[in-house]
Image (tube, rainbow, N blue to C red):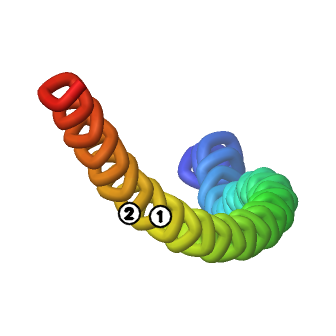
């Protein structure tokens, strides 16, 4: 009887502990996995927030790039117009300089003729 009492007294807690271990272990593992899943969900939500902000930034930058491309097209058109105007003004300037040089030559001829006449009138006069 003593053996039976010992088994009852110590066997029940040991058996309960062993059964509790095997029953509790899957429960504990399930809790750990649930915590891992919850943490993974938080990480996914966090990265989804980053992705949304990044997408908004990309859209804003895309709009800025489009505005800059439009401004660049306008600047290029203005540059072409200015280059044409400059070429036209350069041609007009060249024509005026040519006329100026011709007039300078004509003026020198007239002065030389005038000086020649004066010189003759002083000698003969």
Residue 4: name its quadrant. Answer: bottom right
Residue 47: name its quadrant. Answer: bottom right
- Assign a secondary structure to mark 2: helix
The number of numbered discs placed on residues in the rendered structure image is: 2
Instruction: Determine which of the numbered discs, if any, sits on residue 99 in the image.
Output: 1
Q: Residue at x 79, y 55 (%)?
A: 57
- Assign a secondary structure to mark 1: helix
Q: Position of residue 67 (x, y in %)?
A: 83, 63
Q: Position of residue 89 (x, y in %)?
A: 60, 64
Q: Residues within 10 Å of mark 2 (few under 14, many from 20)?
A: few
Residue 42 in view here? no
Q: Is residue 50 above or below residue 51?
A: above
Q: Front-most of 62 and 68?
A: 68
Residue most extreme to the front: 125
Q: Position of residue 51 (x, y in %)?
A: 76, 63
Q: Front-most of 36 and 80?
A: 80
Q: Front-most of 102 and 81?
A: 102
Q: Is residue 8 above or below residue 24?
A: above
Residue 98: name its quadrant. Answer: bottom left
Q: Is residue 89 left or right of residue 63?
A: left
Q: CA distance from mark 2 to mark 1?
A: 5 Å
Q: Residue at x 18, y 36 (%)?
A: 120
Instruction: Determine which of the numbered discs, if any, sits on residue 110 in the image.
Output: none
Q: Position of residue 27 (x, y in %)?
A: 76, 62
Q: Is residue 50 above or below residue 121?
A: below
Cβ atoms under marks 2 and 1 closer than 8 Å: yes
Residue 92 in view here? yes
Q: Residue at x 73, y 75 (%)?
A: 77
Q: Residues within 10 Å of mark 1 (few under 14, many from 20)?
A: few
Residue on which the image places disc 2: 102
């Amino acid at each position: 009887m003593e053996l039976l009492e010992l088994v009852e007294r110590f066997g029940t807690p040991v058996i309960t502990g062993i059964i509790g271990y095997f029953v509790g272990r899957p429960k504990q593992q399930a809790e750990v996995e649930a915590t891992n899943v919850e943490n993974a969900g938080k990480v996914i939500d966090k990265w989804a927030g980053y992705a949304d902000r990044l997408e908004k930034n990309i859209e804003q930058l895309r709009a800025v790039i489009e505005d800059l491309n439009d401004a660049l097209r306008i600047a290029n058109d203005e540059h072409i117009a200015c280059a044409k105007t400059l070429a036209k003004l350069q041609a007009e300037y060249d024509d005026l300089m040519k006329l100026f040089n011709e007039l300078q030559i004509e003026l020198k001829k007239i002065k030389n003729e005038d000086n020649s006449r004066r010189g003759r009138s002083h000698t003969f006069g």
